[in-house]
Image (spheres, rainbow, N blue to C red):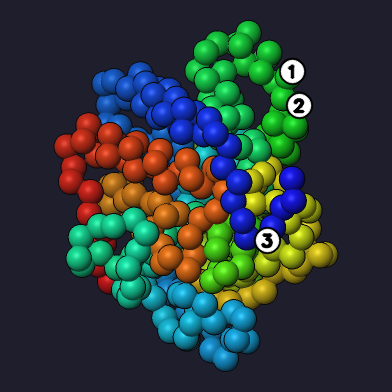
């Protein structure tokens, strides 16, 4: 196949696997939270939901002045840090860590349509530069195996060795969510080009992992740092320059930074604050994030993102209905 830059190539059976994902994940949520308040199917354990400022840099080169980044400005933002594991477990367990940003006051029509007053823009990133699978079919197989028993899971990994390798490489221990570099994994449009995003701590405060850590020591590390100092991150984009070495439809491949380095376009500042309160925890758990909640110039690309648009909306609605909560986007 002759691949082109910033071009998608959807397989014919993708919709079937998306529906299968929704069925399996919804059934898992029903089982896991049959007697309790329903949490997310992934990233259910939140370390903290904190307020911040997302600042678009002034005087960007012309090729970087696209969509949200067309002109300098400052947006208030909610930032949610979490563990990926679908089951709430101690922070000492190796895992993928996530960060989700919700910018507010963003003008323009979003791809995910909400109410007329909803002016939010979401970014979702994780602590590894690769997704575990190459496409929706492979991810559907992984989720089916994870919910189908040990023998089925072992067979899946024996027949999908790259998935196993990517998963093992991505499961790591960390001592502070504010000191992790995060990646979008999936590509996005940037005008007419394709990019991936990264979020890098500017001056990371590495907190030594405790010898006998509590189950929530990552939250405690955030409480400690933000109790006395700010946390600042650089937000950057990496352009796709080779459709084969930097594929759109396989997020399980890291885009080589030596071929195309990340270019800084914004900064995220999380000021020192008190956030570990019951009200803030409830607020953060009720928030919904979707990478399709964005301006058209930054449309998500690739099969995993096409699945996210449908799966995220379906499971968010399912979770909120079970919790008898009407989802609402926060205002600036």
Mark 2 and mark 1 in contact? Answer it, CB < 8 Å. Answer: yes
- Residue 141, quarter of picture: top right
**Dot 2 alpha-carbon crowd within 10 angstroms: few under 14, some 14 to 19, many 20 or more:** few
Residue 55 horizontal/vertical position (percent): 48, 79
Residue 66 horizontal/vertical position (percent): 52, 77
Mark 3–mark 1 Cα distance, whole angstroms, equals 33 Å
What number is the disc on residue 5?
3
> Where does the C terminus fall, quadrant-wise?
bottom left
Mark closest to the chain's N terminus, 3 or 1: 3
Mark 2–mark 1 Cα distance, whole angstroms, equals 6 Å
What number is the disc on residue 316?
none
Residue at screen point 47% across, 40% down: 307
Residue at screen point 76% across, 60% down: 242
Is residue 172 in view? Answer: no
Residue at screen point 55% across, 63% down: 189
What number is the disc on residue 158?
1
- Residue designated by label 2: 161
**Dot 3 alpha-carbon crowd within 10 angstroms: few under 14, some 14 to 19, many 20 or more:** some
Is residue 268 in view? Answer: yes
User: Farthest residue toward the bottom?
Assistant: 59
Whether residue 317 sits left or right of residue 271 in the image: it is: left
User: Farthest residue toward the front?
Assistant: 2
**Dot 1 alpha-carbon crowd within 10 angstroms: few under 14, some 14 to 19, many 20 or more:** few
Tag 1's secondary structure?
Answer: helix
């Amino acid at each position: 196949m002759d691949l082109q830059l910033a071009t998608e190539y959807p397989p014919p059976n993708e919709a079937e696997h998306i529906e299968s994902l929704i069925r399996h994940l919804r059934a898992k949520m029903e089982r896991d939270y049959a007697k309790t308040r329903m949490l997310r199917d992934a990233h259910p354990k939140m370390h903290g939901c904190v307020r911040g400022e997302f600042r678009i840099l002034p005087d960007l080169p012309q090729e970087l002045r696209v969509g949200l980044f067309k002109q300098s400005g400052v947006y208030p933002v909610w930032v949610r840090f979490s563990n990926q594991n679908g089951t709430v477990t101690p922070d000492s367990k190796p895992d993928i860590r996530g960060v989700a940003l919700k910018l507010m006051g963003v003008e323009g029509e979003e791809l995910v349509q909400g109410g007329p007053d909803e002016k939010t823009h979401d970014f979702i990133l994780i602590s590894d530069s690769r997704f575990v699978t190459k496409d929706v079919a492979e991810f559907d197989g992984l989720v089916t195996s994870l919910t189908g028993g040990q023998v089925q899971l072992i067979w899946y990994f024996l027949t999908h060795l790259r998935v196993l390798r990517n998963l093992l490489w991505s499961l790591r221990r960390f001592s502070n969510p504010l000191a992790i570099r995060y990646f979008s994994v999936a590509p996005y449009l940037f005008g007419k080009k394709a990019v991936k995003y990264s979020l890098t701590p500017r001056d990371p405060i590495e907190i030594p992992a405790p010898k006998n850590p509590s189950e929530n020591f990552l939250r405690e590390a955030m409480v400690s740092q933000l109790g006395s100092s700010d946390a600042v991150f650089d937000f950057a984009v990496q352009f796709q320059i080779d459709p084969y070495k930097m594929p759109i439809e396989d997020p399980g491949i890291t885009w080589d930074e030596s071929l195309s380095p990340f270019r800084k376009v914004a900064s995220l500042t999380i000021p020192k604050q008190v956030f570990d309160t019951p009200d803030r925890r409830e607020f953060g758990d009720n928030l919904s994030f979707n990478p399709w909640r964005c301006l058209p110039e930054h449309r998500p690309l690739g099969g995993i993102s096409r699945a996210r648009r449908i799966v995220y909306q379906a499971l968010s609605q399912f979770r909120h209905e079970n919790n008898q909560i009407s989802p609402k986007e926060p205002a600036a």
